[in-house]
Structure formats: C-alpha cells, structure tokens
Amino acid sequence: MKSEETPFFGGPMDGRTLPVLLGPTGRPPKRYEIPVPDADGGTSVVHVYLLEPAGVNRLGLPRGWKYVYAPDGAPRWSPKWPWTKSG
C-alpha cells in the first residue's frame, strides 16, 4: 500500500510529519486517532486529528493534505435519513 508524509498541526503532534497510509483513491483517512497509554495503567487518552487540504490550486483541487488537532474530538458520522426529524 502507498503512504504519504502528512504534517500534523496543533496538539501534541504539532510540527511533526508521519507516513499515513492512503486509501484506494489516493487520499488519507478523514480522521486520524493517536492513542496514548496512561503511565499508571489507567485509561488511555486518544488524540483526534481531522483531515484538511494543505492548499488549493486555481481549479479548487487540493494540493496535498494536513491533519489539524480537534481538542474536543470529532463527532461520529451517522447517516441522515430523510424520514427522521431534525432536532
């Protein structure tokens, strides 16, 4: 599988780049989770990063990708059914 060096912005991984596996379309996953185990053996902390375009060319197409820290995490995606009422 192919991988791409992807930069991380914000949070504990600020300024680092990691090789991230690409999907079948050549795009990294929308959400990247980094679990950090607790030193005392308690519950681990999960840091969540969300994918954003690193830049856009004249046609509006992304020129690379970057991950941005989401301190509150990202809400899980769920399908929006047309027959359900919104909140």
Image (cartoon, helix red, strand yellow):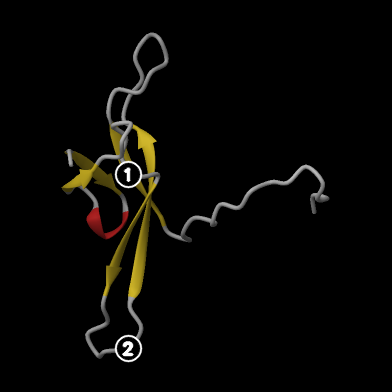
For this rendering, which residue is in front, 44 or 80?
A: 80
Q: Quadrant of the N terminus?
A: top left
Image coordinates of residue 70 in percent, x first then y, are: 42, 54
Task: Tell me if mark 1 has few (under 14), some (14-19) or many (20+) residues whose alpha carbon lies within 10 angstroms of its own.
Answer: many
Tell me the number on the disc at residue 18.
none
Image coordinates of residue 23 in percent, x first then y, are: 30, 39
Answer above or below: position of 56 versus 85.
Answer: above
Residue at horizontal 46%, vertical 59%? Answer: 73
Query: According to the image, label 1 marks what residue?
Result: 67
| Helix, strand or loop under label 1 | strand
Query: What type is the residue that disc 1 sits on?
Result: Tyr
Task: Tell me if mark 2 has few (under 14), some (14-19) or many (20+) residues whose alpha carbon lies within 10 angstroms of its own.
Answer: few
Query: According to the image, label 2 marks what residue?
Result: 42
Residue at horizontal 23%, vertical 45%? Answer: 21
Marks 1 and 2, how far apart in space?
27 Å
Residue at horizontal 78%, vertical 42%? Answer: 82
- Label pair 1/2, CB-CB below 8 angstroms: no
Query: What type is the residue that disc 2 sits on?
Result: Gly
Residue at horizontal 31%, vertical 57%? Answer: 11
Q: Of label 1 and label 2, which has the lower sequence position?
A: 2
Image coordinates of residue 37 in percent, x first then y, are: 26, 78
For this rendering, which residue is in front, 19 or 13?
A: 19
Q: Quadrant of residue 61?
A: top left
Q: How many marks?
A: 2
Q: Quadrant of the C terminus?
A: bottom right
Residue 83 relative to residue 27: left or right: right
For this rendering, which residue is in front, 12 or 83?
A: 83
| Helix, strand or loop under label 2 | loop
Answer above or below: position of 23 versus 62.
Answer: below
Image coordinates of residue 32 in percent, x first then y, are: 34, 53
